Image (tube, helix red, strand yellow):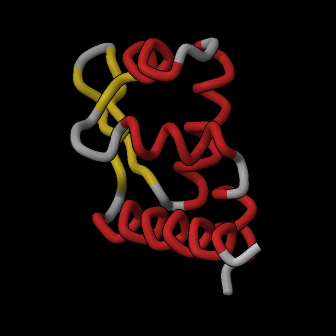
Amino acid sequence: MNDRLYKCLSNSNRRKIIYCIGKQARCVNEISECLNLEQSLVSHHLKELVECGLIEKERDGKKIYYQISKPTVLEMLEKGKELGDELEEGC
C-alpha cells in the first residue's frame, strides 16, 4: 500500500478538491470559490495532491488548471465513501 497516498487522502479538504475538479479542470481561483477556502490553503493542498500523483496541472497562458490524473481516483473515493457509510450503519 502507498502510505503517502492514504495520508494525502486523509485530509477532507483534499478530497473536496478532487470532487470539485472531478468533471472539469479548474484553476486555483475557481477551486477556492467552489469550496469557500482561502486561495493559499487551496494552493497548498493542490501541491500535495500533485506530488501524490492524484491530480495533474496544465498551464494555459498565465493560469494553471488542475484535473484528476485518472478516472480511477474518483472511483476510489466513491468506494471509500460507500465503505464508510456501510461501517457507520453497522454501529
Q: Of 41 and 90, which appears nearest the observer? A: 90
Q: Please give the name of the residue rendered at 46% of the width and 73% of the height, measured from the top-left corner.
A: 79
- Position of residue 59 measured from the top left corner of the image (x, y, whole percent): 30, 30
Residue sitting at x 62%, y 68%: 84
Locate residue 91, reporting x and y percent.
Answer: 77, 73
Image-based side of 36 in relation to 4, left or right: left
Picture quadrant where residue 40 is located = top right
Is 70 drawn above or below residue 29 in the view shown? Answer: below
Residue 69 appears left or right of 76 = left
Foreground residue, 33 or 3?
33
Q: Is residue 89 above or below residue 46?
A: below
Task: Please name whichever residue, 17 or 51, is drawn nearer the observer in this view of the structure.
Answer: 17
Name of the residue lying farthest toward the bottom: 1
The foreground one among 6 and 86 is 86
Q: Position of residue 11 (x, y in %)?
A: 71, 47
1 lies above or below 20: below
Q: Residue at x 49, y 69 (%)?
A: 82
Q: How many numbered marks are there?
A: 0
User: In which quadrant is the N terminus drawn?
Assistant: bottom right
Q: Is residue 22 above or below residue 88?
A: above
**Where is residue 42, by image quadrant?**
top right
Question: Residue 35, position in %: x, y?
Answer: 51, 22
